[in-house]
Amino acid sequence: MYVGDSPVDLRFAQNLEVDSIILTHGYWNEGNIKDAKRYFSVNENFEKALYIAYLNFNQGDYKDNLGNSLKAEYAEFKSQKYQELEPNALYEALSILHQEEDWKKWPEQDRNLYDKDENKAYRESLVKEYEQDIDFHIFKQWLVEREIKKTNENNKQLGIKIIADTPIAFTPAEEWLNKDLFLDGLALGCPPDYFS
């Protein structure tokens, strides 16, 4: 899902489509499957479960039509969205590397990664070094987009119309990528919560 060209933050997105892909199609194959189906177990291990699903999805040698069609669908999504999603994925990788989501506390070269042309070689080396992390981020975005599409199709069949407001907010990654569009130290809106 994209709101103002911003990828959805997946920290709180635990949904049926993801559970379906992880559990139904056999991509979760470590640990106790009964525990994996329990909400709290999945909730506590959500990122781990997604990562295992991602690894198994990529390493699978599919002999069925569903597996092959999912692989083709993901490849198409990735080819269409890679340029848009790569900076956000790299931001996530750097946040983990620095153990800090506030990019203003990162080393100068990482803070200004997209600001200066002389950082291009360094940026390309980071993209190569974190290639799997970037791909994992894109995989999660694909899962969310699939769910939104499926939900919209189901709602249309049921005659349900959803009217919602558009959130006006920016992710830290967007600020990091577009520093010249933001006034330092100013913020808009109310503090985020699990529902916003």
Image: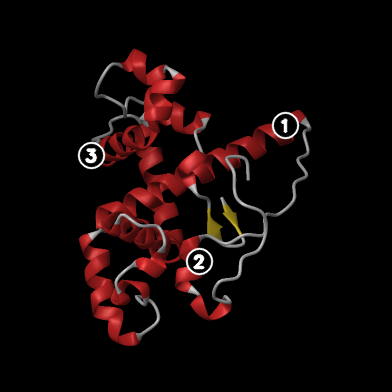
**How far apart are labels 3 and 1 at the CA level?**
35 Å
- Which residue is drawn at the image coordinates 52% and 28% (left, top)? 16
SS of the residue under disc 3: helix
Q: Nearer the viewer, mark 1 or mark 2?
A: 2
- Which residue is drawn at the image coordinates 27% and 42% (left, top)? 58
Image-based side of 150 in relation to 42, left or right: right
Q: Position of residue 180 (x, y in %)?
A: 53, 81
Residue at the spot of label 3: 59
SS of the residue under disc 2: helix
Q: Position of residue 66 (x, y in %)?
A: 40, 32
Q: Amino acid at mark 1?
A: Gln
**Which colouring convention does the figure follow?**
secondary structure
SS of the residue under disc 1: helix
Q: Amino acid at mark 3?
A: Gln
Residue placed most toward the observer, 9 or 156: 9
Q: Amino acid at mark 2?
A: Glu
Q: State yes or no: discs 1 and 2 in contact (Cβ < 8 Å).
A: no
Vertical placement of 84 versus 74: above or below? below
Residue at the spot of label 2: 174
**How far apart are labels 2 and 3 at the CA level?**
32 Å
Which of the 4 image quadrants contains residue 97? Answer: bottom left
Mark 2 residue crowding within 10 angstroms, few (<14) / some (14–19) / many (20+): some
Disc 2 or 3, which lies upstream in sequence? 3
Mark 3 residue crowding within 10 angstroms, few (<14) / some (14–19) / many (20+): few
**How far apart are labels 1 and 2 at the CA level?**
35 Å
Q: Which mark is residue 54?
A: none
Residue at the spot of label 1: 157
Disc 3 or 1, which lies upstream in sequence? 3
Residue placed most toward the observer, 98 or 15: 98
Which of the 4 image quadrants contains residue 31? Answer: top left
Disc 1 or 2, which lies upstream in sequence? 1
- Which residue is drawn at the image coordinates 70% and 54% (left, top)? 166
